[in-house]
Image (cartoon, rainbow, N blue to C red):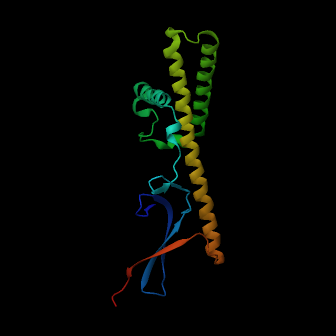
Amino acid sequence: MRLNCGCGNYFDVDVTFTINSQSDFKFYKMEIEDMNEEKRDFKSGVTSTRQTRLSLIPHAGLVNAAKRFELGLEKHGEKSWNNLSDNQTALQDRDWLIERCSHAIEHCYRLIDYLHKDFGMSENFDVAEGDAGAIAWCGLVLGEALNGRKKEAKMQAKSASSDSEFASGGLGRPQIALYVGETSGG
């Protein structure tokens, strides 16, 4: 679940629903992941949560990768993978990901050949640019897949930790209990 803290930032939270049978109240317990994010101060006096510097990505390289995503749509239609695909489970398909790595390696070797033999030759430039886009595409897809696996592993570790802390009476992560209302009139 995503929690909006009211300042434009969102935090991923684990939500645990518990009913206290000894009481007439329901409490929803949310465990906040990490609210100690690094802040950045600006000359104007405002502060903001530090963001990854996406401005470091070359515009032409990003456009080249996007062209590769478009080529995937042309070649494979709805069965191609992109950020808008219905089938996001492809990012969990180990064999497909390994095949993408192999495909990127092929494009790397084509670029190596181009750089050794044809560097600067205009008739081969479009092919070389396509190879570079394919490599960037693969990096983006693999990055997305690995990020998803990392989040999943963190969630599983937190779930296991929360379960053991709950069983042992430990305090665990910071928690917020939200009063929802009475379960019976009174």
Q: Is residue 5 above or below residue 177?
A: above
Quarter where residue 103 is shown: top right
Q: Is residue 186 left or right of residue 158?
A: left
Q: Tell me: residue 18, above or below residue 73.
A: below
Query: Relative to 127, is 24 on the left or the right?
Result: left
Name the quarter where the C terminus is drawn.
Answer: bottom left
Q: Which corner quadrant of the image does residue 178 belong to?
A: bottom left
What residue sits 47% from the left and 35% below the top?
Answer: 81
Dividing the picture into quadrants, the one containing residue 108 is: top right
The front one of 176 and 23 is 176
The location of residue 30, given as percent across then percent down, is 49, 69
Residue at 61% x, 71% y is: 172
Q: Position of residue 146 (x, y in %)?
A: 59, 44
Q: Residue at x 60, y 56 (%)?
A: 154
Q: Kindly identify the residue that appears in the image at 48 percent across and 82 percent down.
A: 20
Residue sticking out furthest to the front: 43
Q: Is residue 15 above or below residue 110?
A: below
Residue 152 at x, y percent in the picture: 57, 53
Tally of marks: 0
Between 46 and 81, the one lying in front of the other is 46
Query: Most extreme residue toward the bottom, as rendered?
Result: 186
